[in-house]
Amino acid sequence: MPVQRIGLVVHQGRSAAVAAARSVHAWSGDHGISCTEIDVWAPDHERRSGREEARAAGDPDLVVTLGGDGTFLRGARIAVKTGASVLGVDLGKVGFLTEVPVGDVIRALDAVRTGDALVEERMTLTMRASRPPEIPAELESPLCYGRGPALPPPQVRPTTTVGDGWGMALDVNALNDVVVEKLSRDHQVSAGVYIAGRLLAAYSADALVVATPTGSTAYCFAAGGPVLSPHMDAVVFTPIAPHMTFNRTVVAAPDESVALRILPHSGRAAVSIDGQLRGVLDPGDWVGVYRAPQRLRLIRLQPTDFYGRLRDRFRLTDAPATATDGESAPFFRPDSPVPPELAGLRLPPPAAAR
Ligand SMILES: NC(=O)c1ccc[n+]([C@@H]2O[C@H](COP(=O)([O-])OP(=O)(O)OC[C@H]3O[C@@H](n4cnc5c(N)ncnc54)[C@H](O)[C@@H]3O)[C@@H](O)[C@H]2O)c1
Ligand SMILES: Nc1ncnc2c1ncn2[C@@H]1O[C@H](COP(=O)(O)OP(=O)(O)OP(=O)(O)O)[C@@H](O)[C@H]1O
């Protein structure tokens, strides 16, 4: 994969990330590759849409993130707009999305340059809304407290036709989730939830989450939702603290939309995309969330071991009663050739290659 321009997203609050950024700049200089810092999180820095950010950095073909999952999501927002790949360097607390330990950053850049890295694609979500989202000025600082300045609201796609009843197509891509949550502590969000255009139920809840399989291990997971393999496509709906008996997650097919219409007596609701506040909804407003045509390209040094990562990063513990059985042996991967009827399965590498 040829790399000509790198966009670098750095968690400036972490000294190891700042030091790693110096190494990436030096490596880029050594190879005649431009390297520009993007999505700089400083109070006086102009916050741009993902597309504007990519353009200002000369449309990078590789985005390198140095931080945790939040920093990775900031890079993903920009990369998905130009089809750039993202290399996530793990300098965070959980690091579920980031792939490469900081000690391997130069090896990973070399692998990308020589074409030895793998690219894995992930589904993203996009949305339509009844009107262009806005963040009222008086709400921006309390809502963004501790998270840096807000991003601009999503732009309306230029191809949108107005007044045909299909709402405004927004230029957004969520790798994790779109969250509609109550704005004031004491007033829940009430919304009609429609899946594939049919009313599922009217909810009154703290928040309503529409997630990708990648996002199933984020907010949805904290709300008791299922874990979905990131290799699949699906649209996952999870209510947060719904005041009703039906509180289950619904996993919809990838060609089914999830729409939320804010009911007349609801409190106002904030819309966040991958954890970033992007708009405020009033009663009567609606958003429809569905699979985006754009997919995010992730750089991998080897095929993702998603379930190993789940066990490792979430510190899954085995049942106490199994402790006397010792460490479970690896399954389904002797060194001998794969039987033909298993050839279509995703398998771990042979023991000798691990
Ligand atoms: N109660 C919750 O767990 C909760 C509440 C609000 C938002 N979130 C999630 O936070 C995400 C934004 O992440 P952030 O780091 O900017 O904010 P954050 O720092 O509040 O992150 C919340 C936690 O989720 C982890 N995380 C993020 N994406 C993940 C994923 N796909 N799989 C597993 N873990 C993941 C992060 O490492 C962090 O520990 C949102 O997309 C939303 O899903 C979670
Ligand atoms: N570029 C930055 N400059 C300064 N502070 C930052 C920057 N990025 C993040 N922070 C600070 O770090 C906090 C955590 O940010 P965020 O959750 O996005 O980090 P992260 O990359 O997910 O890493 P972690 O896994 O440690 O949470 C923010 O609330 C903010 O205070």
Image (tube, grey):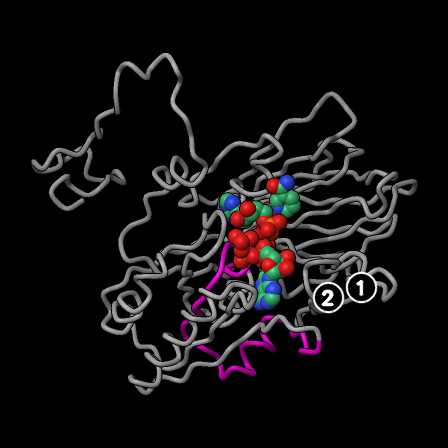
Mark 1 element type: loop
Identify whether 278 is placed above or below 25: above
According to the image, label 1 marks what residue? 134
Mark 2 element type: loop
- Most extreme residue toward the right is 265
The range drawn in magenta is 44-73
- Most extreme residue toward the left is 336
The residues bearing labels 2 and 1 have C-alpha atoms spaced at a distance of: 6 Å
Task: Give left or right: position of 75 versus 328.
Answer: right
Categorize mark 2 by other alpha carbons within 10 Å: few (<14), some (14-19), many (20+).
Answer: many
Q: Residue at x 30, y 77 (%)?
A: 2
Question: Residue 72 versus residue 191: which sits nearer the camera?
Answer: 72
Q: Earlier in the sequence, mark 2 or mark 1?
A: 1
The image shows residue 59 at horizontal and vertical percentages of 48, 79
Q: Residue at x 48, y 35 (%)?
A: 227
- Name the quadrant of the N terminus: bottom left
Callout 2 touching callout 1 (CB < 8 Å):
yes
Q: Quadrant of residue 331?
A: top left
Residue 258: in magenta span = no
- Most extreme residue toward the front is 15
Q: Residue at x 70, y 35 (%)?
A: 240
Residue 54: in magenta span = yes
Task: Give left or right: position of 65 versus 4.
Answer: right
- The kind of residue on which mark 2 rests is Pro
According to the image, label 2 marks what residue? 153
The image shows residue 312 at horizontal and vertical percentages of 38, 38
The image shows residue 300 at horizontal and vertical percentages of 32, 57
- The kind of residue on which mark 1 rests is Glu
Identify whether 98 is placed above or below 37: above
Question: Residue 212 versus residue 187: which sits nearer the camera?
Answer: 187
